[in-house]
Image: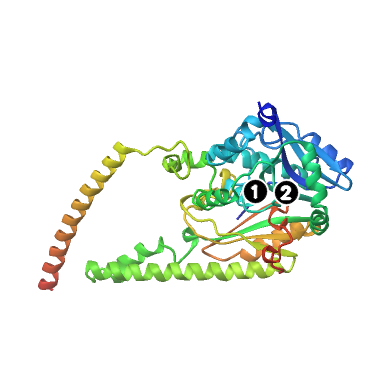
Amino acid sequence: MTERTRRQHMVYAYAVLRPTPEAARAVAVLRGVAHEQVGLVETGDLAAAVGPVPAAEFEEGALKAGLEELPRLEALARGHHGVVAGLAPLGAVLPLRLATVYRDEDRVRRVLQERRDQFLPLLERLAGHVEWGVKVYTDPTDSPAGDTAVPAEATGGEAALSPGRAYLAARRRRRRGAEELWQTAARTAARIAEEAGGLAVGRVAHRPQRGELAQVPGGGAAGGGKPGGENIANDAYLVPADRAEEFRSRVLAAAEGQPGVRVEVTGPWAPYSFALPPDPAARPEPV
Amino acid sequence: MTTTEPVAGRLGPPRLPAAPYGQGAESAASLADILERVLDKGVVIAGDIRINLLDIELLTIKLRLLVASVDKAKEMGIDWWEHDPSLSSRARPRAVPDDDAERSLTEENARLRAEIAALRARAEDRSVDG
């Protein structure tokens, strides 16, 4: 029997933070991806939030299979996020990428020591900041130029046209409408970016969310399930915590009164999008 | 316009996260928003378990196509990833339904062609008349 198969548990690492009494209290009420009690592994001025997880589920093969199954992936992602979100109010937390797993706590300590010069400045930079997500969508149901306006109009002047011409005219108008819609949304997105830039200290562009389900904002909690629309901007902003509410209301205000545009603000998140390695190419662009 | 609040207990003591394994769907954050953060962002440090990041990134790209919650999607009857071998290890090729689908497509195609021909003939009649 090898050393590894004898082992019952692995150590799942969620985040890097400061080893404070508040941090110890915060982890004490958190449960992780395997419903395990989360704890701290400390070394000097750094700590990692970790939890013992069953080796059977988190060995390479099992973990990989889990990641490829959407329900398992969702459970893992939400469990990971739940711990990070529970630590975020501490004010300085570096979320680790999903599925960072070690053989034992000593290995975690060693990594904390090895990467200390990288973690400390990052923690310093992110302390007292939160991340906001800002997504801008076109909203055809809310636009005078949208599809709904076309049929009513078409019954008027085009009754005399041949069906083919009427069809082409309607189609042309629809295309023009869609174009206008998109341009309005793009203008609004630019205005929001400008407004947001006034308060944020960093911005990271995520890829726009596309596809059939992108039109249904998450979990039933958002938006009343407005149909249609294309996500044209999906940005994350790093904002000082004491201006978080101001940021949210200013972004929402910048989108007000824009027909055909829908804006969704999510957060505050732990600063996932800004916890990047000091690779100049991957550094978030300054606002 | 909406806001969601993924940071638990922002204004008070931290509370328990939503139970894993899908119980108590309390978390308001959408799966898409969470995945693009936990898979794409966050500090990358080498763990002892080597998960091929390329695989995960590939998965992420595919997941961009299904960005609502799984429950929501199932509610809507959109669960096609379960039949996509590249998205789910449980997926199996579906021989019979696919044949059916193809046959009904062929039929529909033929019916539409016939309709177009009829419409075209009528339109030509009208333009001759006018």
Q: Is residue B16 above or below residue A195?
A: above
Asked whether disc 2 touches disc 1, contact meaning CB atoms under 8 Å apart, the reply is yes
The residue carrying mark 1 is B38
Q: Position of residue A160 (x, y in %)?
A: 23, 71
Q: Which residue is mark 2?
A: A95
**Element at badge 2?**
strand
Viewer-nearest residue: B115 or A119: A119
**Residue A239 location (% of width, % of height):** 75, 60
Question: How many numbered marks are there?
Answer: 2
Evaluate whether residue A35 shows in this view.
Answer: no
Q: Secondary structure at mark 1?
A: helix
Q: Chain of mark 1?
A: B
Q: Is residue A68 toward the left or the right of residue A156 in the image?
A: right
The residue positioned 48% from the left and 67% from the top of the image is: A181
The residue furthest front is A1
Q: Hey, which quadrant is residue A167 in on the image?
A: bottom left
| Residue at image coords 57%, 51% | B54
Task: State which chain disc 2 sits on.
Answer: A
State how far apart marks 2 and 1 are (Cα): 8 Å
* Residue A47 image-quadrant placement: top right
Residue drawn at (22%, 49%), measured in percent from left and top? B106
Which colouring convention does the figure follow? rainbow
Give the amino acid at mark 1: Val
Instruction: Tell me the quadrant of the picture where the N terminus of chain A can be found.
Output: top right
